[in-house]
Amino acid sequence: MDKKVYRQCVYLANLDGIGSEQQGLKIVICVSNNAHNLNAPTFTCIPLTSKNKNELPVHYKLDTSKYNFLWKEETTVLCESLCVIDKSRVQRFIGRIDDDDMLEIERRLMIQLGILD
């Protein structure tokens, strides 16, 4: 049976990056639309990190006190690391982010893609 993946949900996934790409077992947020997610073997996601990162216009810091499934320390959404992965890379569902945080992530995605300045 295919794994179900939904927009705004957070998963533990195995990323297969090289060089400066994110790699290893990572927490990711699904950002692709659910019509795609329900009909394709892949989905688009953004990795999160607990490492201290330079503040960039394409980074978004989640308030970890709102989400008991995230690290206790600072958690940054790395919108510049947008990637498409196969659903088979998903290890498990972790949680879901709220609409307000998703809007902030979408704004940073538009900056990354050159849609907004």
Image (cartoon, grey):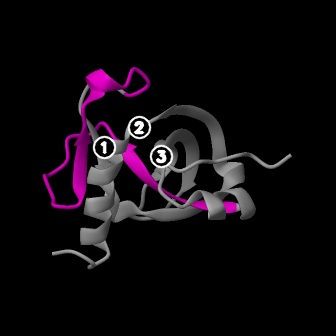
Crowding at dot 3, Cα within 10 Å, few <14 / some 14-19 / many 20+, comes out as many
| Residue 90 placement: quadrant | top right
Given the image, on which type of amino acid does mark 2 rest? Answer: Ile
Q: SS of the residue at dot 3?
A: loop
Residue 112 placement, left or right of 82: left
Judge the density around disc 1: few (<14), some (14-19), many (≥20) Cα neighbours within 10 Å.
Answer: some
Whether label 2 touches label 1, CB < 8 Å? yes
* 115, above or below 31, in the image: below
Q: Which of 25 and 30 is in front in this view?
A: 30
Rounded to the nearest whole Å, what is the CA distance between mark 1 and mark 3? 9 Å
The span from disc 2 to disc 1 (Cα, nearest Å) is: 7 Å
Task: Report if the CB atoms under discs 1 and 3 are less than 8 Å apart.
Answer: no
Q: Quadrant of residue 74?
A: top left
Mark 2 nearby-residue class (10 Å; few <14, some 14–19, many ≥20) = some
- Residue 86: image x %, image y %? 67, 59
Q: Does the magenta stretch include residue 53?
A: yes
Q: Name the residue under label 3.
A: 8
* Amino acid type at image mark 1: Asp
Badge 3 amino acid: Gln
Which label was assigned to residue 101?
1
Dot 1 or dot 3, earlier in sequence: 3
Q: Which mark is residue 89?
A: none
The residue sitting at 25% across, 26% down in the picture is 73
Task: Choose between 47 and 9: the one closer to the eye.
Answer: 9
Which stretch did the figure color magenta?
A: 42-70
**Residue that mark 2 sits on:** 97
Contact (CB < 8 A) between labels 2 and 3? yes
Residue 84 point in image, percent of width and height? 55, 65
Task: Specify whether 53 is left or right of 13.
Answer: left
